[in-house]
Amino acid sequence: MTTATVTTATATATAVTVTGERAAPAAPEARPTSVPNRTGIEVGPKRRLRESTLDEKFNVLGALVAGPTVTTLLFGWFTPLTGPIGWVVVSFVLFIAFYSLLVSLRSDREEVKDRITTVLLISAGVVLFGALVFVVIYTVGRGTIALPHLNFFTQTMQFAGPLDGLDVGGIAHAIVGTLIQISIALAITIPLGITTAVFLNEVGGRFARFVRTISDAMTALPSIVAGLFVYAAIIQLITHQRSGFAAALAIAVMMLPIIIRASDVVLRLVPGNLREASYALGSTRWRTVWGVVLPTARSGLVTAVILGTARGIGETSPVLLTSGITAVMNLNPFSGPMISLPLQVFDFVKSPEPNIIARGFGTAAVLILLVLLLFVVARLIGGKGPGQLSDRQRRRVAGQSADDARRMNRTPAASPAAPLAAQPTGTPAPANPEETSQ
Amino acid sequence: MVEKKFDSLTDLHNILTRETTEKMVVARVIAEEIGTIAPAPMHTGTGRTRQDNPEPLVHPGAARRSLAARASRSDSVFKGVSFTAGATTVGIMLAVGLFLTLRASDALQVAGINFLLEQQWSPETHQFGIAAVIFGTFSIAIIAMCVGVPLAVGTALLLSEVVRGPLRSFLVSLVDLMAAVPSVVYGLWGLFFLQAAVIPVSAWISTYFSFIPAFAVEDGTGARLTEASAFTSSAFIAGIVVGLMVVPTQTSVMREAFSQAPIGEREAAFALGSTRWGMIRTVVLPFGRGGMIGGIMLGLGRALGETIAVYLIISPIFTINWEVLKTGTNSVSALIALRYGEASQFGLSALMAAGLVLFLITLAINFTASSIVARSRSGAETS
């Protein structure tokens, strides 16, 4: 879109200049643009349009104080609720009541409604994000009992009994298992998923629409059913034992539609005129995909893969059926059970022993920190749209086009078509129009 | 003869390529950029029109060329490889579907229609059906929707209408992060923290609203239960946890739809003097209705298939339990996770049948959702 606007803008600009030259003799009385004289005009301080008045601030503040205090006063006497959640619910209801009372003192009905819904929207957000932060902090917080023990990361549970302290045993086998399983799953899903997404976008046709429908349907597949499929089709019929490879297959079945859909969205964002420019320079379809489409969408594709990985690492139910539970390190994905982090959490917390449960929370903390890390990496890479370059990439592209220019100037005697033909093999320099527009 | 002045080349191009039945005679074209185009070669009387003579006049002897080029070798390889990838994806999906159907057919033939009506689950005695587990699955999912939908709608409106600037993009990525938190972590939180905190609320609801049958908690004889142990591991608690898990999915679909409400209509509402809520009610919500319904249904599909969090929290029973606050419920996915290990070949086939039913339900819900999203005004403008 932006590139299109830029071209039209330049076209209009040239049109204007041409018109100017052409129209000059016809209309000699055209005056040059005049800049208004700004001296003597006083400009006041900039007004802030989004500021709330003191009155509005104190309404919120007063209701925020009054709600919980009245709740504390009444709790146990008038309100029959008990427990912290009851307290929160009652004080929220009282807060809304006080707030609407305070607002209605000064405003009409429409404004009261507006204020109350705004407060309700904000509190929905607070509840949701509060719950998320609380889930993460609660898990990591209870995990800190086990996390400081270094052996937690280096040992396995092979020689640790249920009553042993936290300085014996660890989850090294689960970490290794997770890494092996997710690597196999990625080795399957990255080529297959991205090629399918390329097929959907670049080849198209009736079959591509069918593939898109099917991959949409695949997102509806419940994870436990994917696990059951691998269990019955691979383990029972072929390998006759649970293994890391079977678990990786189950994870791959779950990750594939996620990666296909995310890459599909990213590839769709690649501006069409880049493709057309490449075709117009005579490159084949394959060169266009490899040299223009994929490099342009690179950061988005990496983000798609990382987000898919984050989902795949956390999948528990397909692994539950396929990988088997073990306490020993197993480096061979093709034979013997191989446990992974989420399954290890699941296995630990079924135990009644407090030490084992502490280990379970420690494992969950490791898992959640891993997901968090992947997510931050994905955001750092994928914060940019297709074709937006970092400073280093921009310097490199500029250097390459300077090289091209030098080469073209050095051989002016060659046929005039040669420099043109040389260009598409260089960097596609996809972002240049985008940059000028920003 | 028309002598027409065009403002720009684009204008000229648009007029020349316009699909129209009206014949316009172009005799002399004046475009500012290119000056005057030489008068078109005149045929007698009519002048040259687009419909009259599409063939160029310059190369009368040139043979007609085919514009479709033969694909180069790299292109045909590329096409073949990408086609294979698409076919493999379809193949995997069809393999899952076909395998489930084939293996499930054993059990379905034995059970017949009773498969949907029977509550017990003992494939060994051929007494099995999914009435109880499907009921449990839906009761958990409906509670999850009651918890999740208000939160999702509120948060989506908050993100699209109220919050701006860097805070908004931070919160949007926080919602995405929430979708990536593993379900076993939510399960842990529900089991070790939420359960204890929710039990007083359950007890309060069952005390004061027991006239509604779903909220009553009674033992077999009809006496009301009040002790805390009667409220543990209930569908209510599992529903709350699952509700929190599906909110991110719903929120991102809804926010996407809301944020596409046309700016002109928003400003029109404001210009007519409406408050922000008035604008949301009259512009954003009607515009995003399709996205809202689609988001809710997508979340419902995920809630039905959720396994680990439910499995950790509930205590499985095989009877229909209307009292959602009372201990004991079940779900299809929890049933599979519970019984797959001990199952014989026939038992596995019965589990496959249960899984197939669950899959068909989520599939139907997903397709309905995406067709609603695609048909709505907001969805139509997306694609």
Image: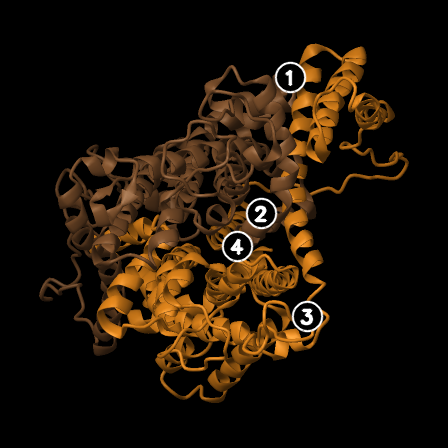
Chain colours: A orange, B brown
In the figure, A288 relative to B224: above or below? Answer: below
- Nearer the observer: mark 4 or 1; the answer is 4
Question: Which residue is at the front of the view, B333 or A403?
Answer: B333
| First along the sequence among labels 4 and 1 | 4
Chain on which label 1 sits: B
Disc 3: which residue = A166
Residue under the point 48% across and 36% down? B235
Q: Amino acid at mark 1?
A: Gly
Alpha-carbon span between mark 3 and mark 1? 65 Å
Question: Which residue is at the front of the view, A27 or B312?
Answer: B312
Q: Are marks 4 and 3 on the same chain?
A: no
Disc 1: which residue = B273
Disc 4: which residue = B184
Tag shown at residue B191: 2
Q: Amino acid at mark 4?
A: Val
Alpha-carbon span between mark 2 and mark 4? 10 Å
Mark 3 secondary-structure assignment: loop
| First along the sequence among labels 1 and 2 | 2
